[in-house]
Every structure is written in C-alpha cells, then in structure tokens.
C-alpha cells in the first residue's frame, strides 16, 4: 500500500483559514493551532508543511492523511465538503450495510 504526502498542488487548493487551522490542529496539536489562530492561512499551511517534512525544528509527522482523502471522506468545516461528503456517506452505507 502506498502513502500520500501533501504536495504544493494540495496546499494551493486549501484556501480557507478555517480549514488550514483545523489541519494544523490535527497534525501539530491544539496548542500549536491555538498559538497560530491569528496567523494567515499561508503561515498555517507553512507550519503544516514543516510538520510533514520535519523542517524548522518541527517533529516530522509521517502517515498523515488529510480528512478529505480518508474513507469515508470527512470535512474540516461544519458545512461539510459538499458533494464529496454526501457521496462518501453513500459509499460508506454501501460498504457497511445496516444490520436487520
């Protein structure tokens, strides 16, 4: 099984500060996210990159998979990930049918 490492294209698609902050909390912890809550999304994404690569004295986190890429797909915001969330929920129901 292969692994995924977020690349520049992934980070270019993350535009929401709310999403970047949630990702930062996930990969760096609540304390790091809270300390950078007023930072721009660009800065927050830079810190996430540091964790992924182990740069700038950040402990490298391996195997991190953004919520959007998990199965079923998850969202970082209360509004969800649009059709991606809805389709993932349908796929999850098919994969794990309800007991009768």
Image (cartoon, rainbow, N blue to C red):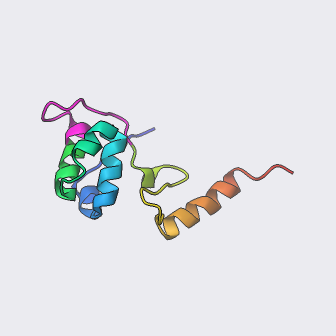
Left or right side of 2 for 33: left
Taking the magenta stretch, the answer to whether it contains residue 55 is yes
Residue lying at the far left of the rendered structure:
56
Identity of the residue drawn at 48% across and 69% down: 82
Identity of the residue drawn at 27% across and 60% down: 17
Q: Position of residue 100 (x, y in %)?
A: 87, 51
Q: Position of residue 11 (x, y in %)?
A: 25, 56
Residue lying at the far right of the rendered structure:
100
Q: Position of residue 59 (x, y in %)?
A: 24, 29
Q: Position of residue 98 (x, y in %)?
A: 78, 52
Count of number-bearing discs: 0
Identity of the residue drawn at 57% across and 66% down: 86
Left or right side of 9 for 93: right
Identity of the residue drawn at 55% across and 52% down: 72
Classify residue 63 by image quadrant: top left
Left or right side of 2 for 94: right
Classify residue 62 by image quadrant: top left
Q: Which residues are magenta?
A: 50-64
Left or right side of 21 for 39: left
Residue 32 vs 15, above or below: the answer is above
Classify residue 27 by image quadrant: top left
Taking the magenta stretch, the answer to whether it contains residue 34 is no
Chief SS of the magenta region = loop
Residue 30 vs 43, above or below: the answer is above
């Amino acid at each position: 099984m292969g692994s995924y490492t977020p690349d520049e294209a992934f980070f270019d698609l993350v535009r929401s500060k709310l999403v970047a902050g949630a990702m930062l909390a996930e990969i760096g912890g609540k304390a790091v996210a809270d300390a950078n809550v007023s930072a721009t999304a660009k800065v927050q994404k830079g810190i996430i990159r540091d964790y992924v690569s182990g740069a700038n004295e950040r402990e490298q986190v391996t195997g991190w998979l953004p919520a959007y890429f998990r199965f079923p797909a998850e969202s970082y915001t209360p509004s969800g990930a649009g059709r991606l969330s809805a389709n993932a929920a349908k796929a999850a129901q098919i994969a794990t049918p309800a007991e009768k």
